[in-house]
């Protein structure tokens, strides 16, 4: 095959590509579940499919997978604090997050700029991650706010030049 790619160089190169910041949610037996995901993508318009890539070592992904459903909450640029809460896991992040339930029963976080409610379509092995596709069952968006963006280890916002 090809040459071995240096891991540090690979991260630096990929760090030059901005990603949106999402929290993928579901409701499990113990209540709401959520995980921060930057590797979210539109897969297909017909049928409507989206995808994301949870790490195989994730302790949260199996809980979401068991529900058969998930909701992608596209965070607004003023919601970086939510990311910190879900990544740290010091306290229950849901204690301070207002939300309502989507048709699937998955949490929709107040203030998200877009929401995509899904049922799990496929889970495919993708190296040290899973590639999860979801069949879109419902969508919402807000005209207000800018999406939270991650680039080169820092958070920011999108500003249109038009």
Image: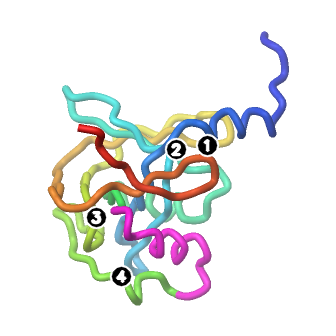
Mark 2 — residue? 53
Regarding mark 3 in the picture, which secondary structure is present there?
loop
Q: CA distance from mark 2 to mark 4?
A: 24 Å
Callouts 1 and 2 close, C-beta under 8 Å = yes
Residue at left offset 17%, top offset 51%: 139
| Of marks 3 and 2, the one in the foreground | 3
Residue 29 among those drawn in magenta: no
Q: Earlier in the sequence, mark 3 or mark 2?
A: 2
Q: How is the image coloured?
A: rainbow
Q: CA distance from mark 3 to mark 2?
A: 20 Å
Callouts 3 and 2 close, C-beta under 8 Å = no
Looking at the rendering, in which quadrant would you find the N terminus? Answer: top right
Mark 3 — residue? 112
Looking at the rendering, in which quadrant would you find the C terminus? Answer: top left
Residue 79: image location, x then y, percent: 40, 70
Q: Tell me if residue 69 can be seen.
A: no
Left or right: 97, with 114 as reference point: right
Regarding mark 2 in the picture, which secondary structure is present there?
loop
Regarding mark 1 in the picture, which secondary structure is present there?
strand
Nearer to the camera, 147 or 82: 147
């Amino acid at each position: 095959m090809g040459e071995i790619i240096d891991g540090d160089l690979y991260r630096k190169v990929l760090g030059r590509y901005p990603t949106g910041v999402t929290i993928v949610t579901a409701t499990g037996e113990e209540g709401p579940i959520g995980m921060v995901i930057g590797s979210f993508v539109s897969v297909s318009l017909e049928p409507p499919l989206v995808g994301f890539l949870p790490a195989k070592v994730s302790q949260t992904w199996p809980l979401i997978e068991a529900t058969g459903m998930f909701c992608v909450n596209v965070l607004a640029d003023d919601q970086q604090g939510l990311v910190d809460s879900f990544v740290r896991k010091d306290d229950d992040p849901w204690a301070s997050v207002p939300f309502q339930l989507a048709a699937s029963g998955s949490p929709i976080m107040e203030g998200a700029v877009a929401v995509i409610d899904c049922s799990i379509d496929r889970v495919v092995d993708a190296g040290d991650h899973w590639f999860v596709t979801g069949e879109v069952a419902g969508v919402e968006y807000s005209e207000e706010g800018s999406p939270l963006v991650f680039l080169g280890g820092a958070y920011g916002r999108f500003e249109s030049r038009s």
